[in-house]
C-alpha cells in the first residue's frame, strides 16, 4: 500500500516516473517549481503520448509565498478557416473526431511553457530552456518503454487511429500495437524539442518549426495555417477563487470547467457535513456536482462569448442560494451530457514553497491522431468539442476558444499550508478533485489515503455512454444501497482501482517546510522527492 512521501528539498508528482524524475532533477540543480514543471511537461509529452503531447493545450496555476497566485491559459483557438460552413461544405454534420479535420485548433501548451519561464525568471530562476528540455529530448531520441496504459488504449482505439496520417509510423510496430515494455522512439520529436530549447518557445508559432508544421498540416488537410500559429499567444491572468472554512481554493477561469470544480467544494462546504466516507459525504458531493454542472453547461464557454461573470457563481450569496437546492436525502434526477477527455496532471512544490499545478492534454487519447512528419508533433482534437449547431453554446467560430475540461487546482490554508492537486479524466476532474480535497482538508485523511481511497464518477467518460453514478468495487455494498435508495442510478464497477476515475495526485507544504506528496495507484506515476 502506498504511503504519503515526505521531504524538505522539493516534491514532484507525475503520472509517469520519468516525468517526475525530470522535475525532481531540476529541483536538485537549484531550479524552482516553474522550471521543474517545464522539464516534467516536456518529458511527459514524450513518455505518455496517449495522454498528452506538445501538439495539445496546457493550463497552469503558479504561486509563491506572499504573492497572489497566477493562472496561465495556454489553449489554442480555432483556425481562421474553421467555421460551420467549412465542415458542412465537406459533407459533415459534426466535426470528425480523428484525422486532419479534427486538428482545427492551435496547440497552445508550448506557449504556456514560455509564460511559465517568465514566472520562473521572476522567481529568480536561471536554468536555460535547453536544459529543461533535455530529459524529454533524450527520451524521445533514445526511446522509452511502452506502458500498460498505452498498449491498452492503442489496442482499444486502433480502428479509429490506424489510418490517420503519421499515427502508424509513430505509434505502431510494423502495423501492430506495441506491447508493454516495447521501446518507443520518436526522433522527429527529439529534434523538435532540441529546436525549442535552442530557439525558444516562440519558434513553435513564428519560426522554422511553425513553417514546417503549417506545411504538414496543409498537406494532411487540416484548416490550420501558418497565420493561425503566428497569431497565437498564451496568457497569464488571475485565477478564480472560492472561500471555504479554513482555506481559499484557486482554479482556472473559463473556457475551462475550473469554475465548476470550485463550485462543487464551495457548495459541499456549506452543507456542513462532519464525517467522511459515509452517505452524507458522497451524496453531498454528487448533488453539489449536479448543481455545478448545470451552471457550467449553461454558461461556461470562451470568455468572449459568456453572458455572466464566472465569479458571480462563486460568491457567498450565489452559493448560499444554490446550496438550498440540494436535497440532503434524495438525488436530483439525472443524467446530463458529459465531456470525455484524456489528460495528465502534475504538481510540484520546491524548497522555498513556490508551487505549480499543471495540466497538459490532447483532449481524446492520442488527440486527432495526426503526427506531423517533419516535426514528430502529435496534434490535439480539442476542437471537436465545438458544435456545428448555430444555436449551441459552443458553436464553432474562427478564432474561438473551445471549452476545456482541464483545470489544475491549488489551495491555501489559513494555518499556512499550501496544496496543489488535480487529475486527468475529463468529466471526472472536478469530482476527483472534490474527493481528494474533501478527504484531506475537511476530514483529515492522510494525503496518500485521500488519493488512494475508492472514488466515484457521475456521468460518462472514456467513450462510455452510461451516465450512471459509478463506484469502484471497494465501496461498502451497504453504502451503495443507501445511494440507490436515495434515487441514484448506481453502477458498481468490477475494478478496485479503475482508470475511469482518473489519475490524481497532490503535494502539500506545511508551514515548517515539510513537504508531502501522493501519487495515484491507478496510474503509472510516482512521487519524486529531494
Image (cartoon, rainbow, N blue to C red):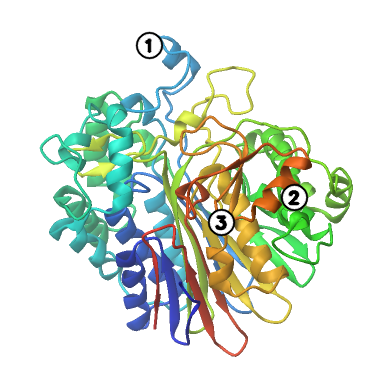
Residue at the (56%, 75%) spot, across then down: 508
Q: CA gap, disc 1 to disc 2?
A: 46 Å
List x then y, in percent, for residue 254. Answer: 62, 45
Secondary structure, mark 2, is helix
Does the CB distance between marks 1 and 2 fall below 8 Å?
Answer: no
In the visual, does 223 lie left or right of 439? left
Mark 1 element type: loop
Residue topped by disc 1 = 90
Q: Which mark is residue 283?
A: 2
SS of the residue under disc 3:
loop
Disc 3 marks which residue?
Answer: 474
The vertical placement of 270 against 149, above or below, is: below
Q: How many marks?
A: 3
Relative to 350, 312 lies left or right? right
- The CA span between labels 3 and 2 is 17 Å
Q: Is residue 439 left or right of residue 173?
A: right
Residue under the image location 60 percent in, 17 percent down:
390
Q: Position of residue 146 (x, y in %)?
A: 23, 53
- Tell me if residue 309 can be seen: no
As measured in the structure, the alpha-carbon distance from the residue carrying label 3 to the one carrying label 1 is 49 Å
Who's the residue at 31% across and 70% down the image? 22
Is residue 355 among the parts visible in the rendering?
Answer: yes
Amino acid at each position: 500500500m502506498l504511503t504519503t512521501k515526505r521531504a524538505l528539498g522539493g516534491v514532484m508528482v507525475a503520472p509517469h516516473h520519468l516525468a517526475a524524475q525530470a522535475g525532481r532533477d531540476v529541483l536538485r540543480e537549484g531550479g524552482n517549481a516553474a522550471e521543474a514543471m517545464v522539464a516534467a511537461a516536456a518529458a511527459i509529452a514524450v513518455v505518455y503520448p496517449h495522454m498528452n503531447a506538445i501538439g495539445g493545450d496546457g493550463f497552469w496555476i503558479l504561486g509563491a509565498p506572499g504573492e497572489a497566485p497566477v493562472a496561465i491559459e495556454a489553449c489554442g483557438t480555432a483556425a481562421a478557416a474553421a467555421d460551420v460552413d467549412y465542415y458542412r461544405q465537406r459533407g459533415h454534420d459534426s466535426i470528425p473526431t480523428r484525422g486532419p479535420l479534427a486538428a482545427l485548433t492551435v496547440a497552445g501548451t508550448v506557449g504556456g511553457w514560455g509564460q511559465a519561464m517568465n514566472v520562473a525568471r521572476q522567481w529568480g530562476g536561471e536554468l536555460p530552456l535547453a536544459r529543461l528540455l533535455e530529459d524529454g529530448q533524450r527520451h524521445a531520441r533514445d526511446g522509452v518503454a511502452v506502458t500498460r496504459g498505452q498498449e491498452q488504449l492503442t489496442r482499444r482505439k486502433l480502428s479509429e487511429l490506424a489510418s490517420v496520417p503519421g499515427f502508424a509510423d509513430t505509434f505502431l510496430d510494423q502495423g501492430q500495437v506495441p506491447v508493454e515494455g516495447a521501446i518507443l522512439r520518436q526522433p522527429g520529436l527529439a529534434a523538435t524539442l532540441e529546436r525549442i530549447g535552442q530557439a525558444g518557445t516562440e519558434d513553435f508559432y513564428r519560426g522554422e518549426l511553425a513553417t514546417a508544421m503549417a506545411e504538414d498540416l496543409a498537406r494532411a488537410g487540416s484548416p490550420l495555417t501558418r497565420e493561425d500559429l503566428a497569431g497565437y499567444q498564451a496568457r497569464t491572468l488571475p485565477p478564480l477563487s472560492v472561500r471555504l472554512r479554513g482555506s481559499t481554493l484557486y482554479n482556472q477561469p473559463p473556457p475551462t470547467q475550473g469554475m465548476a470544480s470550485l463550485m462543487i467544494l464551495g457548495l459541499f462546504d456549506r452543507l456542513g457535513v462532519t464525517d467522511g466516507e459515509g452517505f452524507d459525504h458522497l451524496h453531498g458531493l454528487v448533488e453539489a456536482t449536479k448543481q455545478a454542472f448545470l451552471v457550467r453547461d449553461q454558461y461556461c464557454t470562451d470568455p468572449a462569448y459568456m453572458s455572466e461573470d464566472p465569479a458571480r457563481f462563486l460568491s457567498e450569496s450565489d452559493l448560499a442560494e444554490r446550496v438550498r437546492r440540494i436535497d440532503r436525502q434524495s438525488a436530483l434526477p439525472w443524467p446530463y451530457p458529459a465531456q470525455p477527455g484524456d489528460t495528465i496532471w502534475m504538481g510540484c512544490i520546491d524548497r522555498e514553497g513556490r508551487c505549480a499545478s499543471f495540466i497538459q492534454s490532447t483532449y481524446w487519447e492520442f488527440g486527432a491522431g495526426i503526427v506531423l512528419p517533419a516535426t514528430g508533433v502529435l496534434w490535439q482534437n480539442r476542437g471537436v468539442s465545438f458544435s456545428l449547431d448555430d444555436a449551441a453554446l459552443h458553436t464553432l467560430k474562427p478564432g474561438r476558444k473551445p471549452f476545456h475540461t482541464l483545470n489544475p487546482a491549488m489551495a491555501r490554508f489559513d494555518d499556512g499550508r499550501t496544496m496543489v492537486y488535480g487529475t486527468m479524466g475529463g468529466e471526472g476532474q472536478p469530482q476527483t478533485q472534490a474527493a481528494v480535497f474533501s478527504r484531506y482538508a475537511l476530514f483529515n485523511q492522510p494525503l496518500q489515503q485521500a488519493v488512494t481511497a475508492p472514488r466515484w464518477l457521475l456521468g460518462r467518460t472514456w467513450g462510455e455512454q452510461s451516465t450512471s453514478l459509478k463506484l469502484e468495487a471497494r465501496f461498502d455494498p451497504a453504502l451503495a444501497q443507501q445511494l440507490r435508495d436515495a434515487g441514484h442510478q448506481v453502477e458498481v464497477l468490477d475494478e478496485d482501482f479503475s482508470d475511469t476515475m482518473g489519475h490524481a495526485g497532490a503535494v502539500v507544504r506545511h508551514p515548517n517546510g515539510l513537504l508531502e506528496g501522493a501519487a495515484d495507484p491507478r496510474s503509472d506515476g510516482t512521487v519524486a522527492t529531494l
